[in-house]
């Protein structure tokens, strides 16, 4: 898979030490690897339940980190199945206000802001605009509001997935001369963003893969059925000069990570962008990502020896 610039991570692996006594060694090794400029992928060096998350655009990127842990650092590790990284976005504009007002004896806490959110072009990421005029909110509280927004974006409203491709505009608010502080405005920003996101028709997004193959004409119907069975769609099927049918299909990455779809996953594929999840499936146990069902998952981004597909002989 290739993209302009640094590829967006679409895959996640959980790694842990096979021996609990090696956990500190594993954390140190991952910190050292994460500091290296040529590293492909992202390493989260803060463990959750003893597991560290590795994220990348291809499975080979993540495999190379695991190989280094085994070979260079002589660590025995447990590697979980790859999962597709889900995201969220909004589909319309919405406004909301956030208030954080607490009085605890002496000085209190007062933060109040109003936000507008709206979708932007896919892949654009995040934009924050400050439209405060006439001192409704002092300048020193603008950055804490944005920090609250960014924190809230880390766990969306649909399935706890990070929210992306949204413009956030701060357009009004108020403050208290003695009770306002940065923490109160950070909380207010988070509250306002979450409320606005709930109103803005949030949707869960999943990474899609473009698959291309050449098959004999008698195999086309089977491919169509396979693609449809895994929530995919056919983009093109054309007769080539060699008499084979060239097929291009778009299939969710989460489906390709399942060995039930290994027939499709055997072909070359490329990242085709994020699209809304088209059914009611959601991540297991509230986690972000759709886990592979079995360990014999495909190696994404690599070219299989199965360059062509032929129907079995009777």
Image (tube, rainbow, N blue to C red):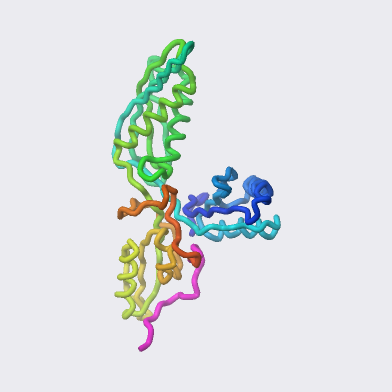
**Residue 276, position as x, y percentages in the image:** 33, 51
Q: Is residue 36 visible?
A: no
Total of numbered circles in the picture?
0
| Residue sitting nearer the eye, 302 or 55 | 55
**Residue 190, position as x, y percentages in the image:** 41, 30
| Residue sitting nearer the eye, 176 or 280 | 280
| Residue sitting nearer the eye, 308 or 294 | 294
| Residue at 43% across, 15% down | 103
Q: Is residue 59 visible?
A: yes
Q: Quadrant of residue 180?
A: top left
Q: Would you say 194 lies left or right of 14 here? A: left
Q: Quadrant of the C terminus?
A: bottom left
Q: Is residue 37 above or below residue 94?
A: below
| Residue at 40% across, 65% down | 211
**Residue 256, position as x, y percentages in the image:** 42, 63
Segment colored magenta: 298-314
**Residue 101, position as x, y percentages in the image:** 40, 19
| Residue at 37% across, 49% down | 205
Q: Magenta includes 35? A: no
Q: Magenta includes 305? A: yes
Magenta stretch prevailing secondary structure = loop
């Amino acid at each position: 898979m290739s993209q302009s610039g640094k590829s967006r991570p679409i895959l996640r692996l959980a790694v842990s030490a096979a021996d609990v006594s090696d956990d500190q060694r594993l954390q140190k090794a991952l910190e050292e690897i994460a500091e290296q400029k040529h590293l492909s992928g992202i390493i989260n060096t803060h463990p959750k339940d003893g597991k560290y998350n590795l994220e990348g655009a291809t499975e080979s990127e993540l495999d190379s980190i695991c190989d280094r842990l085994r070979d260079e650092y002589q660590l025995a590790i447990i590697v979980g199945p790859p999962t597709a990284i889900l995201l969220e976005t909004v589909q319309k504009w919405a406004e909301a206000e956030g208030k954080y007002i607490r009085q605890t004896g002496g000085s209190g806490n007062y933060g109040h802001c109003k936000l507008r959110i709206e979708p932007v072009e896919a892949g654009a990421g995040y934009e924050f605009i400050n439209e405060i005029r006439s001192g409704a909110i002092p300048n020193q509280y603008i950055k804490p509001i944005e920090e609250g927004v960014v924190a809230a974006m880390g766990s969306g409203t649909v399935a706890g997935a990070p929210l992306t491709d949204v413009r956030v505009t701060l357009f009004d608010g108020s403050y208290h001369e003695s009770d306002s502080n940065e923490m109160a405005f950070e909380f207010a920003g988070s509250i306002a963003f979450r409320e606005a996101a709930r109103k803005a028709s949030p949707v869960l997004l999943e990474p899609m893969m473009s698959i291309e193959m050449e098959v004999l004409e008698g195999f086309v119907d089977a491919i169509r059925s396979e693609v449809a069975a895994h929530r995919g769609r056919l983009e093109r099927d054309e007769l080539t000069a060699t008499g084979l049918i060239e097929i291009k299909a778009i299939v969710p990455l989460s489906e390709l990570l399942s060995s039930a779809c290994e027939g499709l996953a055997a072909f070359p594929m490329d990242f085709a962008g994020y699209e809304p999840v088209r059914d009611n499936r959601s991540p297991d146990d509230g986690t972000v990502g759709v886990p592979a069902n079995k360990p014999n998952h495909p190696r994404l981004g690599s070219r299989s020896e199965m360059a062509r597909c032929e129907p079995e002989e009777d």
